[in-house]
Image: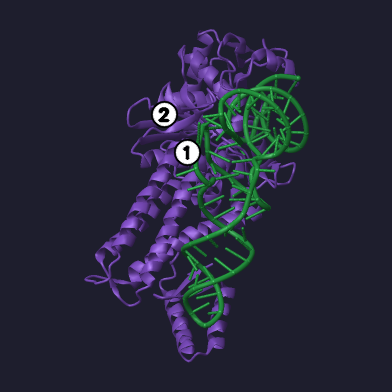
Amino acid sequence: MTIKIYNTMNNRKEDFHPRTPGKVDMYVCGPTTYDLIHLGNARPLIVFDTVRRYFEYSGYQVTYVQNFTDIDDKIINRASEEGLNPLALAEKYIKEYYTDAGALGVRPATIHPKVSEHLSEIIAMIRMIIDNGYGYVVDGDVYFTVSRFGGYGKLSGRRLDDMMAGARIDVDERKEHPMDFALWKAAKPGEPSWDSPWGKGRPGWHIECSAMAVKYLGPGFDIHGGGFDLIFPHHENEIAQAEACAGTGPFARYWMHNGFITVNEEKMSKSLGNFFTVREILARYEPEVVRFYMLSTHYRSPLDFDDTKLDMNKKSLARLHNALDNIEALLSGVSFGPSEILMNAETERFNTVMEKAEQTFREAMDDDFNTALAMAGLFDLAREANAFGKAISGYPGKAFPLEVKEALEQAREKMYKLGEVLGLFEHRGTAAEDSGLVDKLMELVIEVRREARSRKDWAAADTIRDRLKDIGIILEDTPQGVRWKQK
RNA sequence: GGCGGCAUGGCCAAGUGGUUAAGGCAGAGGACUGCAAAUCCUUUAUCCCCGGUUCGAAUCCGGGUGCCGCCUCCA
């Protein structure tokens, strides 16, 4: 089974062949840490985390590199506003990053390199670029000679001439070509700076990713990812730098770009006032809901955030959790052993359907990580497990053959296994940190209500159930007994 | 101006030439229940418009309309 990836370089889906059999080396552009991460940052994190998880599920060994940009204009500006050292500010938001990304189920990368710790690699690369004739120095700044690099524009499908025609920025007169970009910026007073052959200064934005990707993955690594907006100029420039330095290509073999997030159908931006940090969203929705929602649309499509859609997806996700609850309730509430109940047909059918669901899931993911379609496999699994459970409920109080138990266990395992690829169901069962006190109270309440029901005192029974609901606890009367859950 | 993307049922969203156009949410009907909840079953689409290619198109081509993004170190 070959995984297909839509490669921005060719605008086509291509079969994925790793550089090294069994291994995947990927680099994803990480955040500039001048503030809490926002929804727009969260999408590539979740998308590429899922890509990574699927590769691992498929048996690959993944080296995942995601940088932190901790030297940048925005950091310097923010630091001076807050009277902080720029690197200390960046460090603070790197810590916050781990909190938010972790909440969203984004696993830490294999390596999280920082710009501030790779100055020597960056300077070496710039030197090589200059030596190879692709860079020039002006007053302590170093620029990349765009017109010299024949492949410039190959990723974004632009031609230098077209860009010139459309340029509407003030052009720095010292540059040889308006599209030449900075590799190194001479230090201004009060800014953090490092020594270099061209004097004190700091790296341009694009060079860091070229240098760190090459350092950790080498040239010609497998996958480079990031948001759509990075195609130009960021990734275009990364390619130019790395390939000008190496003297050959490719820098990366497959380029993946995730679509944008909008809020209420508008681009998310601070000026529009529809800017949301991950933390703000997580105050209102479970992280799992946010993650589920982000994966309910194909990663290359735009994704719109509003409460209606989040609410909708919260319910969808609940369906999956309910199915798991139902399976677990059966496993713990039904007895298994010698039995004269025959469920061979049902069990066989269930086992077949489970296999098919996983196959659906795998085929979908193989096809350019079609998470939306893959989820359908998960829902198929849920529906069939529920239906199977319903068949069991037709024989209350009876023991069931072990094959039935095995089928249920397998369904549970499969749900968790596929869910893990999407980063779902990872916190089930971990919420009970109340040292059993709540459990004991609930047992008491349920016992009282049970007595009321046996007296057919429906008013009392319903009052208990309604009041619990107000508190946020749902009571369910099932054939296997009373069940409760939060929220 | 240059480049690119998108338009599928009430809503979200898969589907890139071929049996009945996935899945979820919402709605309707039924089953189960003391009533619920959860669950199961049934049910809801002339695929933006007009041409064209083809035996056959949501899917390919041309044109139109509408929306969006990039070209500004915003993922």
Q: Amino acid at mark 2?
A: Phe
Disc 1: host chain: A
Chain B colour is green
Tell me if residue A365 comes above or below residue B36 in the rendering.
above
Instruction: Name the residue furthest bottom.
Output: A455
Tell me where residue A128 appears, x and y as whole percent: 49, 13
Residue B70, quarter of the rendered image = top right
From the viewer's side, name the closer residue of A361 and A220.
Answer: A361
Left or right, residue A58 beside residue B68: left
Q: Tell me, by letter, which chain the rendering colours purple.
A: A
Circle 1: residue type: Phe
Residue A16 badge: 2
Determine whether, in the image, residue A479 is placed left or right of residue A235: left
Residue pointed to by mark 1: A369
| Residue in the picture at 58% in, 79% down | A467
Nearest to N terminus: mark 1 or mark 2:
2
Q: CA distance from mark 1 to mark 2?
A: 12 Å
Q: Nearer the viewer, residue A78 or A150?
A: A150
Q: Are marks 1 and 2 in contact (CB under 8 Å)?
A: no
What's the coloring here? by chain
The residue at the point 64 percent across, 15 percent down is: A159
